[in-house]
Amino acid sequence: MLLAVTGLAGGILIGWALSEMLVKVLTGVFDPPPASLAVPGAYLTLTALAALIAVLAAALNGIRRARRPAIEELRDL
């Protein structure tokens, strides 16, 4: 869970910094320049939901696998 939260926080920070940089770089290209960043709310919501489902599925699978003895897991391979 710590890895997922850290990755999400880093991704959010990098995405915000890149979008700010692109707006400043492309201000001279667009006429008129954008007044602010456009945030695609639906896309961000679906992406966050998909990430949450993936983390929960991985955690549930890990919990289920941890209940079985290791020798049984090796036999299944």
Image (cartoon, helix red, strand yellow):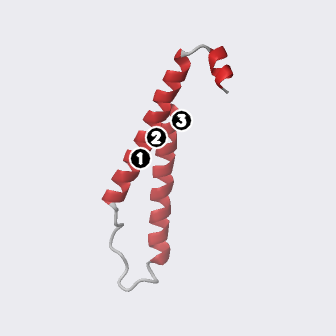
Residue bearing the label numbered 2: 54
Identify which amino acid the numbered label 1 is placed on.
Ala
Label 2 crowd (10 A; few <14 / some 14-19 / many >=20):
few
Is label 3 or label 2 in front? 2
State which tag comes first along the sequence, 3 or 1.
Answer: 3
> Does residue 2 sit above or below 50 in this rendering?
above
> Does residue 26 sit above or below 68 in this rendering?
below
Q: Nearer the viewer, residue 22 or 7?
A: 7
Which label number is shown at residue 21?
none
Residue at horizontal 52 percent and vertical 16 percent from the top: 67
Callout 3 touching callout 2 (CB < 8 Å): no
Q: Nearer the viewer, residue 26 or 76?
A: 76
Residue at horizontal 49 percent and vertical 22 percent from the top: 63
State which tag comes first along the sequence, 3 or 2.
Answer: 3
Residue 28 is situated, as x and y percent measured from the top left of the image, at 46, 82
Residue bearing the label numbered 1: 50
> Does residue 53 sit above or below 47 in this rendering?
above
> Does residue 48 sit above or below 63 in this rendering?
below
Residue 38 is situated, as x and y percent measured from the top left of the image, at 34, 66
